[in-house]
Amino acid sequence: MTRKYNFSSGPAALPEPVLRRAQAALWDLDGSGIGVLEHSHRGKAFRAVIERTTAAIREVAGIGDDFVVLYITAGATHHFTMVPHNFLGEGDTADVCHSGLWTTKAMAEIRRFGKAHVACTSEPAFDATPGPPAYSASPRYVHYTSNETVYGTQWATPPANPPAPLVCDASSDIFSRPLPLANHGLIFAGAQKNLGPSGITLVIASKAFLATRKPGLPPLADYMTYVDEGSMYNTPNTFGIYMIGEVVAWIREQGGLAAMGERNARKAAAVYQFLDQSRVWRGHARTDSRSNMNITFRGATPELEAKLVARAEERGLTGLPGHRSVGGLRASIYNAFPEEGVHRLVELLDELEREHR
Ligand code: PMP
């Protein structure tokens, strides 16, 4: 069986060596005679998995003792609710740098608990990261999405001079480049793009920020439960944690986050350079805000876009239609997406452009 070039926005392509190791671990984890799905989360073998996973994350991302690393079952959407539930009292404000669909969803949840102040916005086109922010007087935190998966924009650097800790939804660019921890109170990332399977979220949170959460929350809604219980208050997603560990070990083998960042920039530049000189294809995001993870673009006509999707499928290139809310085209090229697949896409775009003239 030949594998396709999978441009899906997530769940998305994972590194092939990791998938092969996981195949073997389903049968027998680390020579234990029991598969990874079958091990007790309280046993020695799984304890070794979670410990090495956290150690690899800390090493690769340069995370010190002032931050905790947590694994929380459920996706990033869960944290749209969990963050304001933990940190916003009635009358409190969260500032939001509004960059698209994902901050829209986060704001709806913030408003259940307190007030949302839009500090900056790039609506309605969402073709850039917004800025510079006009913060409110005393927000509890400042929420932003480091990479807007739907619109294809990515912050080059986090929002500047925040008056309160930054809360970052890093679901679609976690570990795709060095992780900026300065000024951050909490970073959450659903795993299914750069880290592993869906249904599990990696949380990196500052101890000082967590200490300011509201008391009396239900246990699974309280970030401190995950800290106090080592992410094992209830049975965690053991397979998800195993996969995250393998993916992060693979990132380390590739040279770490700086090397990933260079490779991702090179992959994305190959497509953007083509789009910039094309007469029939055009990128959505403004040059200074372009995402290296999700390249959003349009064809001169809907027919041309449909032709691309159809011919791509014939060639084993799949997952190119844009998000259902915006249409157009989107090539998601996370860490594990092979460089060769990017060149195959550019060749196909060029071929269709020549036919279109
Ligand atoms: N935030 C961002 C930036 C995303 O890209 C996604 C998923 N595409 C989510 C949040 C939601 O993740 P989940 O479906 O795992 O809850």
Image (cartoon, rainbow, N blue to C red):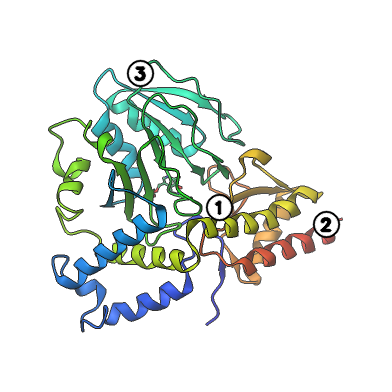
Inter-mark Cα distance, 2 to 3: 55 Å
Q: Which residue is at 56% across, 72% downward?
A: 4
Location of residue 350 with respect to 19 vertically, above or below: above
Instruction: State the SS at label 3.
Output: loop
User: How dense is the environment of label 2, judged by Cα within 10 Å: few (below 14), some, or many (20 and up)?
Assistant: few
Instruction: State the SS at label 2.
Output: helix
Residue bearing mark 2: 356
Q: Amino acid at mark 1?
A: Met
User: How dense is the environment of label 3, judged by Cα within 10 Å: few (below 14), some, or many (20 and up)?
Assistant: few
Q: Amino acid at mark 2?
A: His
Residue 293's label in the rendered image is 1
Label 3–label 1 contact, CB within 8 A? no
- Residue 47 versus residue 291: which sits nearer the camera? 47
Q: Is residue 250 among what the camera can see? A: yes
Instruction: State the SS at label 1.
Output: loop
Location of residue 223 with respect to 308 vertically, above or below: above
